[in-house]
Amino acid sequence: MSKPDENISFKTDLHFNDDWEALLENKSFVKSFLSDVLGDYITKQRWYGGKASKLKYIELAEYFKIQQNGEMYFGLILEVNFVEAFYQHYFLPIAFVTDENFAQKDRILHLRLKKQDGFIIDAINLEAFRQLVFERILTALPKDTTKVRYHKSIALKAKAYESSRFMGLEQSNTSIIYNDSYVLKFFRRIFADKNPDYEMSRFLSEKKEYKNTPAYLGSINLVDSKQVTITIALMQEMIPNEGDAWDYMLKELHKVFCNLEYKNLNISHLPRTGLYQQLNISDIPPQIIDWAGLQLFMQVQTLAKRTAEMHIALGSEFEETAFTPTHYNGDYTVWLKNKMLYQFQNRLNLVENNLHKLDGMALDLAKEFMNKKNQIREHFVDFDWTKLKGERIRIHGDYHLGQILVKDRDFYILDFEGEPESTIRDRKVKQPPLKDVAGLFRSFHYAIYATVFNNQESYPYPIDELFDASEVLYSYITGLFLGTYVTETQNANLNIGYNQERLFLLKYCLLEKAVYELGYELNSRPKWAIIPLKGISNILNH
């Protein structure tokens, strides 16, 4: 175990004449714990999502016991209030340990209870806690009506606890691998509702038997004092894999760009295709196949099929109202336009304030973005639902190459939590399935440009020519994906609209995604702002 950070000071003078089991009934302890201790602790955690805001105070919204056979831990729902007049909720399970060897990691507080010296720590670091949680899921009753509801799927075949370990460096959640076969994801940032990841995983596994996502195996939900169900944890099968599709694509694309020199290709002579044309493999010119390799295009086809199958499963429900397809209407249109206009204005201000960070093509594209602000705004407002004949369904919502695992030349889709900036209600709004397709297209665009940025010295071509090759490759990859996806969905009678409607929705969603990305790039790595800016330019000029 790693040693605690030498710079973190812990209060050691707290002493309460309470048993651990009754500690949270002590108002004096709770007040001190919330005001003097937890603020310092949680703001340092990787899963804390309020780093850009100023913390005002923390309240204990709810607490509950996680227990079995005399062992007891507390689950805390913390309401973190910010100076900017909003709040977030976090889940923190805590344990009291008297042996300092168990308190090396995520130590929150040193205190004395009655005559026992000890430490409050994040319970997830204790194997005993992890084992207890696993066993509670394993022995869950078919219908649990208690406050903390453990659920076990019939697909969970484990007989007993064997081992547990942390999965790795995650940002917003903490995942534990059990018996080298199962993953239990503890949601840290939580919402007063069922988590979309839990809902979607359970629906796809149990109701639709969709095979290309980790199977749902169990969960922990809390029914709070207002009778609202809050998802605490989700258990799924662990898919042995060769990494995610982002890393896979970066390796494949590096080979493609190396081929430019190896095959002595003249980039300006490469055959072109229009953006967002629906292509089959047979439509891709031999020179492009020779340059990029047939294998890459076959993998793109497979991913298009898996994406289509996911949407077909999500769009074929007629009983469970949370998942039944629905048509476009005025309410959806008002929601969408308000959301888009607010986001666009925010990004426009960011571009204006960060022009000094840009140069070359990125600066030219940023100026085009500002010059065409009225055109972009009109594009977002020009959403006439009465002309749309397709249907909206529940979608992934944050679909990109990093959310997809690669295994044996196939793909497995993960993490149905939805767009991080969105509210829980917005994440559950039924949307055009093409929004997920647009998310993946933007991810392809990123992967291609990231390959150029990361390996520029390896390719003996001017940067402008490499950008030109990037756009050629992007148009063939997305064209083949789109052709495969549309064929698959139409064969299954998923109503994604007629041809012009599909093109309108795809461009709308691509523009939405690129504008969304622009904020992140300008704030984090201005050099990469060229990628969403080029995506925006593509849409405006096609």
Image (cartoon, grey):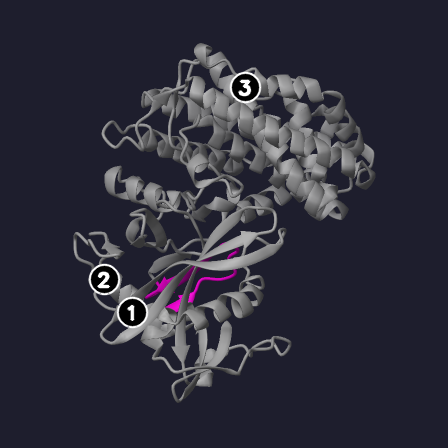
Relative side of 414 to 265, left or right: left
| Residue density around tag 1, few if under 14, some if 14–19, many if 20 or more, within 10 Å | some
- Asked whether the residues under the numbered discs 1 and 2 touch, taking CB atoms below 8 Å apart as contact, a structural biologist would say no
Relative side of 213 to 173, left or right: left
Q: Position of residue 142 (x, y in %)?
A: 16, 53
On the image, numbered disc 1 is attached to which residue? Answer: 132
Tell me the CA gap for discs 1 and 2. 10 Å
- Asked whether the residues under the numbered discs 2 and 3 touch, taking CB atoms below 8 Å apart as contact, a structural biologist would say no
Q: Position of residue 156 (x, y in %)?
A: 24, 56
On the image, numbered disc 2 is attached to which residue? Answer: 138
| Residue density around tag 2, few if under 14, some if 14–19, many if 20 or more, within 10 Å | many
Query: What residue type is disc 3 on?
Result: Gln
Judging depth in this view, the residue of 341 and 234 nearest the camera is 341
Q: Which one is in front in this view, the residue at disc 1 or the one at disc 3? A: 1
Tell me the CA gap for discs 2 and 3. 50 Å
Magenta stretch in the rendered image: 162-180
Q: Is residue 84 above or below residue 188?
A: above
How many numbered dots are placed on residues in this image? 3
The quadrant holding residue 338 is: top right
